[in-house]
Image (cartoon, rainbow, N blue to C red):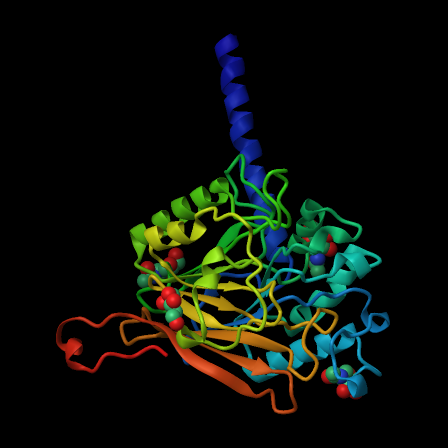
Amino acid sequence: MARFLLIVFIVLCFLSSFITVNTQRTRRSSNGSATKQLRFDKKKGEFKILQVADMHYADGRKTPCEDVLPNQLFHCSDLNTSVFINRMIKAEKPDLIVFTGDNIYGFDATDAASSMNAAFAPAISSNIPWAAVLGNHDQESTLSRAGVMKHIVTMKNTLSQLNPEGIEIIDGFGNYNLEVHGAEGTSSMNKSILNLYFLDSGDYSTVSSIPGYGWIKPSQQFWFQETSRKLQKTSKAPGLAYFHIPLPEYARFDKSNFTGVRQEGISSASVNSGFFTTLVETGDVKGVFTGHDHLNDFCGKLSGIHLCYGGGFGYHAYGKAGWSRRARVVVVSLGKDENVKSIRTWKRLDDQKLTTIDEQVLWRRSSSGSRRKKPPVVNP
Ligand SMILES: *[C@@H]1O[C@H](CO)[C@@H](O)[C@H](O)[C@H]1NC(C)=O
Ligand SMILES: *[C@@H]1O[C@H](CO)[C@@H](O)[C@H](O)[C@H]1NC(C)=O
Ligand SMILES: *[C@@H]1O[C@H](CO)[C@@H](O)[C@H](O)[C@H]1NC(C)=O
Ligand SMILES: CC(=O)N[C@H]1CO[C@H](CO)[C@@H](O)[C@@H]1O
């Protein structure tokens, strides 16, 4: 009898876990047609990502712009941020839109959920899949960090996730990875040939002896390293990482070795939690993309990894009057062998022509054999 009950118990456990997995799948796939497997476009041989950093969205039309020229103040609100996203989507037609935190500016947002609904609306109505991580201001309205991320994952067309499945303890909310598979009908169609990582870089230190901003914790680094190693077993895919607060290593550059501008200090955590070292050691990530410092928009290369800022996007965020709001685009291109060949980036300014600036190659697959005869590509 005891044995029979045990078997029944095991069968029930099995069934309930099966049902949980299935309802989760249904939930995600029912939430918009765009939430299917990301993959490269066969015709273009490309995958394009639009990064939107620091929207600082609050209450829409009622929320004024900050740091615009005196003659621009009138008729300037959060709605200008929405107009800018719509124009960027139309101009670039990205395959994925990534919001790197401070998506809403909590202190001024009356209701966090409404503010997020308005902030992400242009991405949602474009029907392009999108992903978001948290900044240090998203939790300052009516929802906690967990609450904000829980709201985001229910929104239409999002690929954002609360935290990785099957991991008991991980710091933060919104740590997840996305695989970008090869083009339909090619030999790489069923595997990740571009690995995307999204992390919660925290808000503020909760350790009394350490002042300042949060940092990427060991639990998150461990998850990243495990995930990356698993992915690298099936493919030597390059990776890109997106989060909000810049790593302390962003301070290692000056004008002589970055592309873009640095007009304010690097507001990283006051301690170095070692994530840069983990990235270098793990090896797949070629580019890191953060926000947080709205007046910095540069990319610099250290130990084989480009560290990039998105540049301030939102009109209700601090900025610099007369210095255009901007967004970063990353294009990953396939080679003839249907694997990733190069990663390029540029920025667009929110001016009349959406001017493209600072185009640069972030990474190129190192050639081997006969291809070595070609002159090496010099990175700017
Ligand atoms: C904000 O949008 C309004 C209405 O479309 C427009 O007239 C104004 O020029 C925009 N301001 C800025 C700074 O882009
Ligand atoms: C990829 O998976 C699909 C569906 O399982 C299968 O039909 C196809 O043959 C696979 N292609 C390759 C190249 O592995
Ligand atoms: C950039 O150049 C400066 C000297 O101008 C140097 O001190 C710094 O180490 C360089 N940084 C990197 C990452 O190469
Ligand atoms: C647009 C849409 O279908 N949204 C739904 C996504 O899933 C959550 C949770 O199941 C629903 O609450 C939303 O209405």
**Whole-percent x, y for residue 192 in the image:** 39, 59
Residue 176: tell me if it is visible.
yes
| Viewer-nearest residue: 307 or 195 | 307
Furthest-top residue in view? Answer: 1
| Viewer-nearest residue: 92 or 29 | 92
Q: Quadrant of residue 310?
A: bottom right
**Whole-percent x, y for residue 289 in the image:** 50, 64
Compared to 146, does 237 lie above or below? below
In the shown orientation, is residue 254 left or right of residue 310? Answer: left
Q: Quadrant of ligand 4?
A: bottom right
In the shown orientation, is residue 183 left or right of residue 34? Answer: left
Look at 36% across and 47% down and name the residue there: 230
Residue 183: tell me if it is visible.
no
Q: Quadrant of residue 360?
A: bottom left
| Viewer-nearest residue: 149 or 373 | 373
Compared to 196, does 94 lie above or below? below
**Whole-percent x, y for residue 87 in the image:** 65, 82
**Whole-percent x, y for residue 126 in the image:** 64, 74
Look at 62% across and 69% down and name the residue there: 294
Give the total of numbered labels: 0
Look at 65% across and 66% down and name the residue there: 54
| Viewer-nearest residue: 355 or 94 | 355
Compared to 376, does 303 lie above or below? above
Furthest-bottom residue in view? Answer: 353
Q: Quadrant of the C terminus?
A: bottom left
